Amino acid sequence: QAEDGIRDVERSRGLGDVYKRQPWGIAVNHKGEIIISDWRNNRICLYDSNGNFIKSFGDIAKSLEGDMLQLDGPAGLTIDDDGDIYVADRNNNRIVVYDRDGKYVTQFTGDATLSKIGKTYIMSSPRVLRLREMSNREIWTKLRAPASVRTYKNLIYIPDFGCHRLQIYEKESYPLTKDEIFEEPNHPTLYNV
């Protein structure tokens, strides 16, 4: 074991650099590549199955999403059956979705609703009902410091650490055949300039 705490085996396999940075989440994609969230450097690192660094990603183009542009404290991550990568961007209170190549797809910040049990509890307690009426309910629908995300089939599970709850989403995807996808135009348009 070396002075910095990284074993020589890890260093020789290429993973040593990310171990110094504070890794948080880890997943393996369908090709056997290793994906690690690098908390301290606000990026996602991709390694081949032998541990050799391939690339990192995590930047979001400024023209796509308002104020929160870059990852800030990427924590847990997971890969769904389509190869999409979900990252719990803890300090930005959101989940960021990348495609299998690391290109930004979308983000979501939460839109929680009450379960039947929660509604029953609130309606049966006048004090809780009054406090709910007096509060700003909009902020309570949003994610607060999600530290992890998991997928199972078409469901996305997000432990919402700051609100002490679990938010569950369903992914809608429509696989297309090559015949259903239009070719990219070979002349300038609004979409490819």
Image (spheres, rainbow, N blue to C red):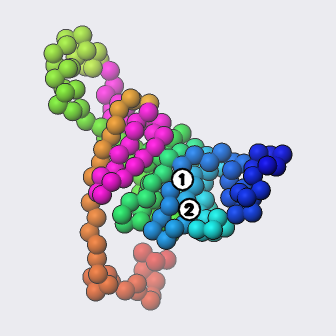
Query: Which numbered disc flags the more N-terminal residue, 2 or 1?
Result: 1
In this rendering, would 162 be left or right of 175? right
- In which image quadrant can residue 91 be found? top right
> In the displayed structure, would residue 169 be above or below residue 190?
above
Q: Residue at x 21, y 33 (%)?
A: 115
Q: Please say whether residue 154 is one of the residues in the magenta stretch.
A: yes
Residue 187 visible, this angle: yes
Where does label 2 land, which residue? 34
Residues drawn in magenta: 135-161
Which residue was labeled with disc 1? 26
Q: Which residue shows up at 56% across the image and 62% down it?
A: 34
Q: Which mark is residue 107?
A: none
Closest to the observer, 167 or 65: 167
Residue 105 visible (yes or no): no
Q: Where is residue 136 shown, x and y percent of the image?
A: 33, 25
Query: Residue reaching furthest right?
Result: 3
Disc 2 crowd rating (10 Å Cα; few below 14, some 14-19, many 20+) is: many
Residue 11 in the image: state x and y as whole percent. 75, 58
